[in-house]
Image (cartoon, rainbow, N blue to C red):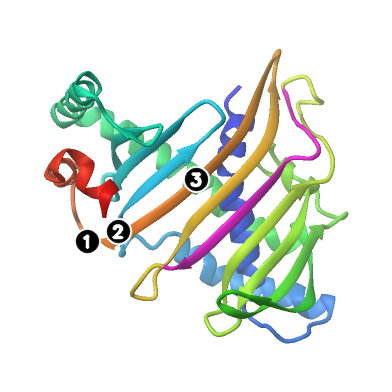
């Protein structure tokens, strides 16, 4: 059963997209005005989500109760390429480094592996775009006032499920249970922080195939990382998903940092060479 698992991995992006759709105006809005604003803004959000003209290189530090891994990642026209550079905040030992080099050798010599990765990325993006198109009908939006933040004043919106929305497929089921709050930088009209909560259990296949449990939550922060390019810099998620007779708990913190532009049109083999040129990866962790 892949669909519920795929959805939970995409949930932070789906929720953030929901927040961005409501971000076009900081002034007080009636519910009807907010709904109309979402419809107008979504065309821009869909276009932005498909923009591949600003590839980046960055560090991803992902932590769970059992493991912390840091990867150096480069976005390319062939999909993202990653190199593991530390485990539990310790640089790779010789054996682990040799394994990582062997993995990159295999990837370099077998383009089908990267094509498969890219197909997965494209499929995930297709789901996100489909859900973006549903957002005007899936949620009710309301302006909730101003608040102070370290970067200055931000504007706050709430979103709740629209009781008239009928999800057409597995990927959209969670939208019927999701509500939360969004903080928006009014000058840039971008989301700076978002909190989303599952207010009820979400079943797949009448609960036989899977279930997202009530109480799950996600926190997302994003920022201008340079050149007016906004990227996600922090994601924290706690979700419990049951698939058939197995239960999977998502309890992760992701920190994205050291964003830097890379040439447009970069291919995945060039990205591997860039990753290998980083002095064994240690230079990236020490800067």
Query: Which mark lies nearer to you, 1 or 3?
Result: 3
Instruction: Indicate whether residue 193 is drawn in magenta.
Output: no
In three-dimensional space, the C-alpha distance between marks 1 and 3, rounded to whole angstroms, equals 26 Å
Check whether the beta carbons of the residues at disc 2 and disc 3 lie within 8 A of each other: no
The quadrant of the rendering that contains the C terminus is bottom left
Residue 62 image offset from top left, x and y in percent: 46, 39
Q: Which residue is mark 1?
A: 264
Q: Residues within 10 Å of mark 2 (few under 14, many from 20)?
A: many
Q: Secondary structure at mark 3?
A: strand
Instruction: Indicate whether residue 223 is drawn in magenta.
Output: yes
Residue 268 image offset from top left, x and y in percent: 20, 43
Q: Going from the N terminus, do you reach mark 2 or mark 1 first?
A: 2
In three-dimensional space, the C-alpha distance between marks 2 and 3, rounded to whole angstroms, equals 19 Å
Q: Residues within 10 Å of mark 1 (few under 14, many from 20)?
A: some
The residue nearer to you, when weighing 241 against 51, is 241
Residue sitting at x 67%, y 38%: 238
Q: Is residue 230 above or below residue 216?
A: below
Q: Which residue is mark 2?
A: 55
Q: Which mark is residue 254?
A: 3
Does residue 83 appear to the left or right of 272 in the view shown?
right
Q: Going from the N terminus, do you reach mark 2 or mark 3 first?
A: 2
Query: Which mark lies nearer to you, 2 or 3?
Result: 3
Residue sitting at x 70%, y 30%: 240
In three-dimensional space, the C-alpha distance between marks 2 and 1, rounded to whole angstroms, equals 6 Å
Residue 146 image offset from top left, x and y in percent: 73, 80
Q: Going from the N terminus, do you reach mark 1 or mark 3 first?
A: 3
Residue 276 image offset from top left, x and y in percent: 14, 40
Span of residues in magenta: 210-224
Check whether the beta carbons of the residues at disc 2 and disc 1 lie within 8 A of each other: yes
Residue sitting at x 81%, y 53%: 165
Q: Main secondary structure of the magenta part?
A: strand
């Amino acid at each position: 059963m892949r669909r519920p698992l795929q959805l939970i991995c995409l949930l932070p992006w789906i929720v953030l997209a929901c927040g961005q759709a409501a971000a076009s105006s900081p002034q007080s809005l009636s519910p009807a005005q907010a709904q109309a604003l979402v419809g107008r803004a979504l065309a821009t959000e869909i276009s932005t989500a498909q923009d591949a003209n600003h590839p980046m290189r960055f560090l991803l530090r992902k932590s769970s109760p059992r493991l912390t891994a840091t990867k150096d990642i480069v976005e390319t026209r062939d999909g993202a390429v990653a190199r593991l550079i530390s485990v539990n905040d310790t640089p790779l030992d010789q054996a682990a480094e040799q394994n990582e080099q062997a993995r990159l050798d295999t990837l370099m010599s077998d383009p089908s592996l990267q094509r498969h990765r890219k197909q997965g990325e494209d499929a995930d993006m297709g789901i996100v775009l489909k859900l973006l198109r549903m957002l005007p009908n899936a949620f009710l939006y309301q302006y909730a006032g101003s608040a102070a933040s370290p970067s200055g004043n931000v504007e706050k919106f709430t979103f709740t499920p629209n009781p008239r929305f009928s999800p057409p497929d597995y990927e959209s089921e969670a939208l019927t249970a999701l509500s939360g709050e969004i903080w928006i930088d009014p000058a840039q009209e971008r989301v700076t922080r978002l909190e989303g909560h599952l207010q009820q259990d979400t079943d797949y296949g009448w609960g036989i195939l899977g279930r997202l449990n009530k109480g799950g939550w996600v926190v997302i922060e994003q920022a201008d990382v340079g050149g007016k390019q906004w990227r996600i810099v922090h994601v924290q998620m706690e979700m419990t998903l049951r698939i058939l007779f197995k239960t999977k708990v998502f309890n992760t913190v992701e920190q994205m940092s050291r964003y830097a532009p890379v040439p447009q049109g970069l291919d995945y083999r060039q990205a591997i060479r860039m990753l290998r040129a980083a002095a064994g990866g240690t230079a990236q962790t020490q800067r």
